[in-house]
Image (spheres, rainbow, N blue to C red):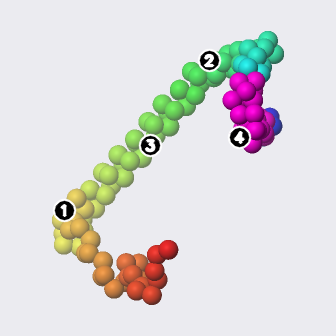
């Protein structure tokens, strides 16, 4: 269904953009699309979709709340576990020194002078 809708939108856009009649073709297409959107079958489907979203919203909200709670628990336990492990100097992991600056000649940061931008 989504593919058909995208195809229709693409055809309509191509028609308007490729049309020699210009504004008149745009106005005609706009009127037809408005008429289609306001038709009873389309509005019935819109209402059904809105109803389905309203029915599922509490369930999805509960799932998102539970997922956020679990993520917070995992992150909290990882932070506490990392803070309780001593590093090589005997201090905690929170007191570690930052990593060394990478070597400018390393392949990841080396800029080849033979490569020129376009």
Can residue 34 be seen here?
Answer: yes
The quarter of the displayed image where residue 4 is located: top right
Could you tell me which secondary element the residue under label 3 belongs to?
A: helix
- Report x, y in % for residue 26: 71, 29
Query: What residue sits right under mark 3 in the picture?
Result: 71
Instruction: Decide if residue 41 is on the left or right side of residue 61.
Output: right
Instruction: Label 2: state its secondary structure.
Output: helix
Upstream in the sequence, badge 4 or badge 1?
4
Q: Is residue 76 above or below residue 116?
A: above
| CA neighbours of label 4 inside 10 A, class few (<14), some (14 to 19), many (20+) | some
Residues 96 and 15: in front is 15
Task: Tell me the SS state at disc 4.
Answer: helix
**Residue, disc 2:** 54
Residue 15 at x, y = what percent?
A: 77, 38
Q: Nearer the viewer, mark 4 or mark 2?
A: 4
Q: Identify the image quadrant of residue 68.
A: top left
- Give the structural element (helix, strand or loop) at label 1: helix
- Nearest to the eye among marks 2 and 1: give it: 2
Q: Give the main secondary structure of the magenta stretch.
A: helix
Residue topped by disc 4: 17
Q: Is residue 16 magenta?
A: yes
Please name which of the two marks, 2 or 3, marks the residue nearer to the observer.
2
What is the distance, in whole Å, between disc 3 and disc 4 at their CAs?
A: 48 Å
Residue 72 vertical placement versus 93 (above, below): above
What residue does disc 1 label? Answer: 95
10 Å crowding of disc 2: few (<14), some (14-19), many (20+) = few
Circle 1 packing at 10 Å, graded few (<14), some (14-19), many (20+), is few
- Distance from the alpha carbon under mark 4 to that under mark 2: 38 Å
For marks 3 and 1 on the same chain, the one whose residue lies earlier in the sequence: 3
């Amino acid at each position: 269904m989504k593919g058909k809708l995208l195809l229709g939108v693409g055809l309509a856009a191509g028609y308007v953009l490729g049309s020699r009649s210009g504004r008149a073709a745009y106005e005609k297409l706009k009127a037809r699309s408005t008429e289609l959107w306001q038709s009873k079958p389309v509005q019935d489907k819109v209402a059904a979709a809105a109803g389905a979203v309203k029915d599922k919203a509490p369930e999805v909200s509960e799932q998102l709340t539970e997922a956020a709670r679990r993520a917070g628990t995992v992150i909290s336990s990882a932070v506490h576990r990392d803070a309780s492990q001593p590093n090589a100097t005997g201090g905690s992991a929170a007191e570690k020194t930052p990593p060394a600056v990478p070597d400018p000649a390393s392949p990841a940061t080396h800029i080849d002078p033979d490569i020129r931008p376009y």
